[in-house]
């Protein structure tokens, strides 16, 4: 696992020898530092503690987080100094809320890097991570990674206010985990855009609307609707002083509360904020079956069992459809280890892995992921223990064989690791998020009722279009906006970004490397068809996301020739014309450049009438998986030059 910046700091502390002695006293010491008066208060130079700060600190010590949040939310960030954030971190850690407590301490350090109590508390937390082992080590590593993600928020008060708000509204373990999960699944750029406490309030309001708590969201947002006489220092503010994003969010609050007139009024005050799908819709899921009430044809196609998007995951009784080997399968790297599968019931597949010494590791299959078009990989949970693992062997459809899962390159030492690679909570979330409508619907979460999205087959409507409650309310009330995340009229770059969440790469990509033919959404962007169309080309230009993949080349060649034909000379057509039309609809060309940059697509000098796919988008074998994928880096594929003979 990659060492986070937080853990990098640990090494310096440990080498100094200061931490190991402190860790012996346990976490209780952290709380004591704020109880004994050794607080390193920033007001020690004779300045009195502000009334708001006193209220915040007293409320935190008493565990009244609602009162503390109210005191520092109007105006945003009031009373959140290093002392108050230290109090918050101490209190949360004492309540076993490690991630938020640690985050509050990080916020305190940002407010005052010399704050002595904060420094000692953080040293102890980071030092404990060094000496921990077993389950404690795994828990603290997960916590450190989550804290590092949250630290994307800029500024101490903004980060501290986010931690306080998450702690206040996560008032039960289930609610706390859900709110934190909803933050962690976001693009980190969204957190980096928060540089003031008002931004934290807006994010908290979004989370509350996503979880069906619009009234709580309204209480956070209302103070942000400022007058011209008191304009907010906010990127979302207009020249009139109105926080446009807050107004836009309040229009959605009003939709959820069935306050149509107020929704219209707030939308008017938003003055165009969110236009062009620039802001995700903060709404609960309604489930694909609700979408079917108006969109029957699209629903029937997308949720049909033959559609690969509806077969991205098998769980529960769906495991009955997963193919199993009829005999034990040798481990791909150690043939002395055997993997045996037994179907005990429709919803239960047991796995037993046995080595040559007779050591046995057992697990139960929790998920099988993959549509089966290329293959299926399973995720199991250890028996006992429940540790999630990605199995070392996978099923490959073309060969009807079982062999190594991508990434299996070493022989483990621990018998349990022969079952598969241990997955962190973060890794499991990421797997499920690309194979379901909403990853939490596939997790066994105690004391929670599954949402309507849990009834979706694989990937449902709201995985791509966004949660739908606001849309349903908008249609029912005649609201001026559709209030849905993505539609066919969305900007092309927005549509491509949606597909890229699962069909793209977050790392460095060599566009011509066969290793990356699986990440079509990324390699497409290297092609001249994409760059020449000024960003107008996207996945849905050629593919219907509601239907199964068409594998007949004659389906795609007309789409190529719509641009690359002799009739297009001297004028933009096909995707180019689409770029101009969609660009005009969204305030400019689709890629943001002037329309004059559009040039006529070239005509193929070899065969201008057919053969586009075979020449320019051949199927290429991905070396590690030994499977063939269509290369979406559309270009001229040349045969490699012959190697000259030696000595001649």
Image (cartoon, rainbow, N blue to C red):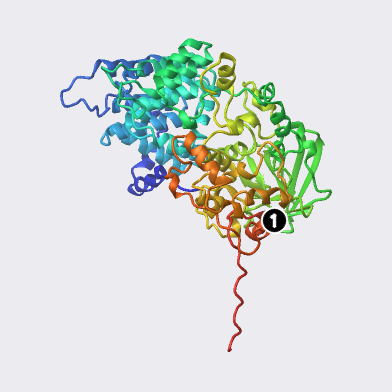
Locate the C terminus and report the quarter of the image it occupies. Answer: bottom right
Q: Give the image location of residue 245, x and y in percent.
A: 41, 24
- Horizontal arrangement in the rendering, residue 542 relative to residue 400 (left or right): left
* Up-down relation of residue 45 to residue 501 (above or below): above
Residue nearer the viewer, 387 or 571: 571
User: On screen, 601 above or below 578?
Assistant: below
| Residue lying furthest left | 46
User: Residue 302: horizontal and vertical position, in percent?
Assistant: 70, 34
In terms of image quadrants, where is residue 233?
Answer: top left
For residue 353, side relative to residue 443 (left or right): right
Q: Residue at the location (80% across, 51% down)?
A: 328
Query: Is residue 625 visible from the viewing direction of this image?
Result: no
**Residue 14 appears left or right of 642:** left
Closest to the observer, 162 or 615: 615
Q: Where is residue 85 in the image (x, y as percent from the top left)?
A: 34, 26
Q: Which of 582 and 446 is in front in this view?
A: 582
Q: Is residue 387 above or below residue 597?
A: above
Query: Which residue is pictured at 71% across the width and 48% down the height?
Result: 555
* Residue named by callout 1: 627
* Rendering quarter of residue 234: top left
Label 1 neighbour load within 10 Å: few <14, some 14-19, many 20+: some
Q: Viewer-proximal residue, 383 or 143? A: 143
Count of marks, rendered view: 1
Q: Residue 315, percent across and down?
A: 72, 34
Q: Quadrant of residue 6?
A: top left
**Mark 1 residue element:** strand
Outermost residue, bottom side: 647
Question: Is residue 297 shown left or right of residue 278?
Answer: right
Q: Is residue 311 visible?
A: yes
């Amino acid at each position: 696992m990659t060492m986070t910046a937080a853990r990098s700091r640990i090494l310096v502390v440990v080498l100094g020898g200061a931490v190991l002695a402190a860790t012996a006293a346990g976490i209780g010491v952290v709380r004591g530092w704020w109880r004994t008066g050794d607080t390193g208060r920033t007001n020690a130079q004779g300045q009195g503690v502000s009334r708001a700060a006193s209220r915040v600190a007293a409320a935190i010590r008493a565990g009244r987080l609602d009162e503390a949040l109210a005191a520092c939310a109007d105006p945003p960030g009031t009373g959140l100094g290093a002392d108050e954030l230290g109090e918050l971190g101490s209190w949360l850690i004492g309540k076993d809320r490690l991630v938020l407590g640690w985050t509050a301490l990080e916020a305190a350090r940002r407010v005052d890097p010399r704050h002595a109590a904060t420094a000692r508390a953080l040293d102890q937390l980071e030092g404990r991570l060094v000496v921990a082992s077993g389950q404690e080590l795994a828990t603290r590593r997960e916590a450190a990674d989550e804290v590092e993600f949250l630290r994307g928020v800029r500024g101490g008060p903004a980060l501290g206010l986010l931690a306080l708000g998450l702690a206040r509204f996560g008032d039960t373990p289930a609610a706390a985990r859900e709110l934190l999960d909803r933050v962690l699944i976001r693009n980190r750029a969204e957190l980096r855009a928060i540089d003031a406490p008002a931004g934290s309030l807006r994010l908290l309001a979004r989370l509350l609307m996503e979880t069906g708590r619009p009234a709580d969201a309204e209480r956070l947002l209302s103070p942000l609707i400022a007058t011209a006489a008191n304009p907010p220092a906010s990127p979302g503010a207009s020249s009139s002083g109105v926080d446009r994003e807050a107004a836009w969010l309040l229009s959605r609050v009003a939709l959820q509360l069935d306050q149509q007139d107020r929704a219209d009024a707030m939308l008017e005050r938003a003055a165009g904020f969110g236009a062009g799908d620039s802001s995700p819709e903060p709404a609960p899921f309604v489930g694909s079956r609700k979408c079917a009430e108006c969109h029957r044809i699209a629903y029937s196609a997308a949720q049909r069992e033959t559609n690969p998007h509806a077969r991205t995951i098998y769980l529960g009784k769906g495991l009955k459809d997963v193919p199993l080997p009829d005999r034990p399968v040798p481990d791909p790297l150690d043939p002395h280890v055997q993997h045996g599968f037994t179907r005990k019931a429709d919803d239960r597949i047991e796995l037993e892995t046995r080595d040559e010494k007779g050591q046995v590791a057992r697990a139960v299959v929790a998920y099988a992921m993959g549509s089966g078009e290329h293959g299926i990989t399973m995720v199991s949970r250890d028996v006992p223990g429940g540790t999630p693992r990605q199995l070392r062997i996978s099923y490959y459809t073309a060969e009807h064989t079982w062999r190594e899962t991508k990434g299996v390159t070493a022989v483990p030492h621990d018998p349990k690791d022969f079952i598969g690679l241990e997955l962190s909570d973060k890794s499991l979330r990421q797997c499920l998020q690309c194979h379901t409508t909403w990853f939490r619907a596939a997790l066994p979460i105690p004391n929670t009722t599954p949402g309507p999205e849990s009834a979706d087959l694989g990937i449902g409507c709201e995985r791509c279009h966004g949660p739908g409650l606001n849309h349903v309310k908008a249609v029912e009330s005649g609201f001026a906006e559709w209030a849905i995340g993505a539609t066919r009229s969305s900007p092309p770059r927005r549509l491509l970004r949606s597909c890229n969440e699962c069909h793209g790469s977050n790392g460095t990509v060599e566009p011509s490397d066969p290793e990356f033919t699986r990440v079509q959404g990324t390699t497409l962007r290297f092609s001249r068809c994409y760059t020449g169309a000024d960003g107008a080309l996207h996945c849905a230009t050629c593919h219907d996301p509601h239907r199964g993949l068409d594998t007949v080349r004659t389906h795609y060649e007309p789409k190529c020739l719509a641009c690359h034909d002799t009739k297009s000379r001297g004028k933009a057509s096909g995707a180019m014309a689409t770029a101009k039309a969609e660009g005009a609809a969204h305030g400019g060309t689709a890629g943001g450049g002037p329309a004059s940059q559009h040039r006529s697509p070239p005509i193929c000098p070899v065969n201008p009438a057919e053969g586009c796919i075979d020449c320019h988008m051949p199927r290429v074998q991905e070396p590690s998986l030994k499977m063939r994928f269509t290369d979406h880096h559309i270009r001229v594929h040349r045969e490699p030059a012959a190697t000259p003979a030696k000595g001649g």
